[in-house]
Amino acid sequence: MKSEREIFDNYLIKKNLRETPQRVMILDAFLKREEHITAEQLYDIVKKRDPSIGQATVYRVLRLIVEAGLALEVDFGDGVMRYEHCYNHPHHDHLVCKGCGKTVEVMDSVIEELQKRVAESFDFELMDHEMYLYGNCGDCRKKSRG
Amino acid sequence: MKSEREIFDNYLIKKNLRETPQRVMILDAFLKREEHITAEQLYDIVKKRDPSIGQATVYRVLRLIVEAGLALEVDFGDGVMRYEHCYNHPHHDHLVCKGCGKTVEVMDSVIEELQKRVAESFDFELMDHEMYLYGNCGDCRKKSRG
DNA sequence: TTGTAATTGATAATGATTATCATTTGCAAT
DNA sequence: ATTGCAAATGATAATCATTATCAATTACAA
Ligand SMILES: [Mn+2]
Ligand SMILES: [Mn+2]
Ligand SMILES: [Zn+2]
Ligand SMILES: [Zn+2]
C-alpha cells in the first residue's frame, strides 16, 4: 500500500510536473488535518511555515491533490469549496446540521445500491453522486427548545 | 387548491410587501416555464416584455418566490443557481449527465425513507436533503463509443 | 392629495476562484 | 559548473454570479 506522498510524486512524474518545496509543504499540511478544509484555511496554515507562499499556489496544489486521487471536493452549499482526504478513506456522504454546521459522515450501502439502480433505470451509467442530508442535530434541538 | 398567484399575493400581504407590476411579470414568466431556469435566463425573458426592468429585481423577486414556497433552488455544481417550481410538484432529486448536461427528475421512496433513518440514527431531525446522481446518459455513451 | 415607507434600476461592491505575466527555479544536456 | 529552457511561483488583475447601496420613483393608506 503506497503512501500518499508516493501517490502524489508518481502523479507529478506521470504528468511531467516538478516536485517543489511548495507542493510538498501544501500536501503535508493538507494530510495532517483530518477535517474538511478550505483553500483559505490551508493557506493560513502554510503561511505560518513560509510567509512568502502565494495563495494562488495553494489553489493550484489543491487541484493537483484532487487530480492525484488524494482529495475530494465537498460543497456544503455555503459558497466555499472544502477538501477532504479520500485515499484509504471509504466513500461517504454528509449529514449537515443547519443550526451549528456540524457534519457527520454517513454511508448506507442500501442507498448506494438503489442510487445505481435508479440511474440504470434511466439508461444512465452512474459515475458519481452527491448526497447531503440537512437537519438539526440533537444539541441544536435542545438549545432551541430552551 | 389555491393558485400560485394567490399564494404569492398572500405571501406579499403577510409580509407587508407590495404587489408591483415587476413582481407579477417575473412570477408569470417563471411559472410559464417548466424547466429549471437561472436568474439570468429569466431576466432575458422578462426584458423582452419590459426592457426597463432591472436585473437586481429579478434576483429579488426570485428570492420572494422561493420564500413564498413556489420555487426551490437547485445547484448542479456549475456555479449558477437554478430555480424550479415546487408548488404541486412532488419532491424529486436529479440525475445529471456529465456529457451533455441533460437532467432527469427521479424519486425513490425507499431512498427517501432510508435517508430519514440514517439521520435519525445520528440523532438528527432531517429537514431537507440534496441528492445529485452524476453519470453518462445512453446518448452520450453511444457518441463516445464512436 | 399627501405622506411615507416600500420598490426600483443603475451601479458599485463582494468574495471565491482563475487567468495573466514577469521573475524565479528545477533539471537535463553540455 | 554552466547553460538553456520549460515549469513553477507570487503578485496582481480579472471573472462572474450574486448582493449591497442609494437616489429616484411608486404604491397605498389616511
Ligand atoms: Mn467527509
Ligand atoms: Mn427538478
Ligand atoms: Zn447543530
Ligand atoms: Zn448526455
Image: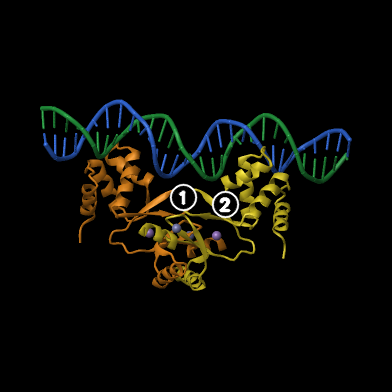
Chain colours: A yellow, B orange, C green, D blue
Residue B57 visible in the picture: yes
Q: Is residue A14 left or right of residue C5?
A: right
For label 2, being within 8 Å of ligand 1 is answered no
**Quarter of the figure with the C terminus of chain A:** bottom left
Q: Is residue A87 left or right of residue C10?
A: right
Q: CA distance from mark 1 to mark 2?
A: 13 Å
The number of discs equals 2
* Mark 2 nearby-residue class (10 Å; few <14, some 14–19, many ≥20): some
Image location (x, y in percent) of residue B80: 44, 48
- Please name whichever residue, A76 or D5, is drawn nearer the observer in this view of the structure: A76
> What secondary structure is found at the residue carrying circle 2?
strand
* Contact, mark 1 vs mark 2 (Cβ under 8 Å): no
Residue A38: image location, x then y, percent: 56, 49
For label 2, the residue is A37
Q: Is ligand 3 less than 8 Å from the beta carbon at label 1?
A: no
> Percent x, y for residue A14?
72, 54
Using residue A73 as the reference point, say whether residue A2 is left or right of it.
right
| Chain holding disc 2 | A
- Quarter of the displayed picture in which ligand 3 can be seen: bottom left
| Quarter residue B126 falls in | bottom left
Tell me the kind of residue under disc 2. Answer: Ile
User: Label 1 belongs to which residue?
Assistant: A78
Q: Which residue is at 72% across, 62% downward?
A: A2
Q: Amino acid at mark 1?
A: Asp
Residue A137 visible, this angle: no
Give the SS element for disc 1: loop
